[in-house]
Image (tube, helix red, strand yellow):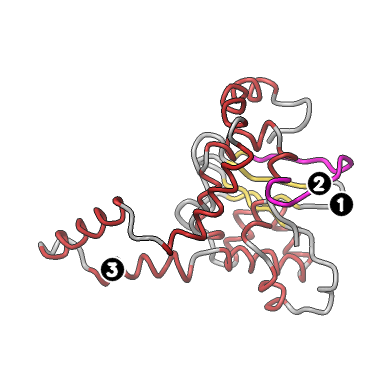
Amino acid sequence: MSRDGQKIDRRKFLKGAAVGAAAVSSTAISNAQDQESADHQHAPSDIALRVKALETVLTEKNLVDPSVLDEVVDRYENRIGPQNGAKVVAKAWVDSDYKARLLDDGTAAIGELDLLGTEGEHMVVVENTAEVHNLVVCTLCSCYPWPTLGLPPTWYKSSAFRARAVIEPRAVLREFGLEVSDETEIRVWDSTAEMRYLVLPRRPEGAEDMNESELADVVTRDSMIGVAIL
């Protein structure tokens, strides 16, 4: 975790990367976001074509079962994704006892919903409040809680986001369209291979009468990373 005045050594370590990234940062994160939404509009990339060719060869040699591959793809596209994290958030909003357990031991509480798994075995949940806004990053690579948020977005893996989120989180959030007041403390949580983080966003105004299922529908992936609010 990084706060103003703390983790000075980590900041110095990242400073060089941040300076270089800042030179192109005004467009780097935006371009990564645009690329994520536009990828499906273009012809398959060279990597995608190679993967498809490899799959074809392995299938022809009976080394892989296409149905098993389809099951894996379906799992991450439709059954593992932000909708799982949204279930965790919505339950915390309507069940104060569950919320307390979630903030005390995220791994155990998420496990109650059977939403732990590979790339998300150990979880910490951090709560946004009127005084504190949380932001999750992985400065070394792109560690991300797959079971609760699915596959990481392109911008999360970008060098610009990874380098600058710790150094200048307000500026980074501003590029996502989120203005955080100077009175609000920003806490940056650095995910690792051993520990992944999930932001518990504040319940949006006007959602007091929504049930748990309805609340889950309004929770977004970005709000659980901390680059957006609801």
Against 70, residue 6 (above or below) is above
As drawn, is 158 to the left or to the right of 172?
A: left
Residue in the picture at 48% in, 60% down: 38
Residue 183 percent location from the top left of the image? 89, 41
Q: Between residues 205 and 111, which one lies in front from this camera angle?
A: 205
Residue in the picture at 56% in, 43% down: 195
Marks 2 and 3 sit apart, C-alpha to C-alpha, by 45 Å
Q: Which residue is mark 2?
A: 180
Please state which amino acid type lies under the numbered disc 1: Ala
Please state which amino acid type lies under the numbered disc 2: Val
Q: Which residue is mark 3?
A: 68
Secondary structure beneath label 2: loop
Q: Which residue is mark 1?
A: 130
Of callouts 1 and 2, which one flags the residue occurring earlier in the amino acid sequence? 1
Question: Which residue is at the far left?
Answer: 61
Q: Is the Cβ of the residue at disc 2 closer than 8 Å to that at disc 3?
A: no
Boundaries of the magenta span: 174-189
185 in the magenta segment? yes
Against 113, residue 133 (above or below) is above
Residue in the picture at 29% in, 66% down: 69
Tag of residue 203 = none
Q: Residues within 10 Å of mark 1 (few under 14, many from 20)?
A: few
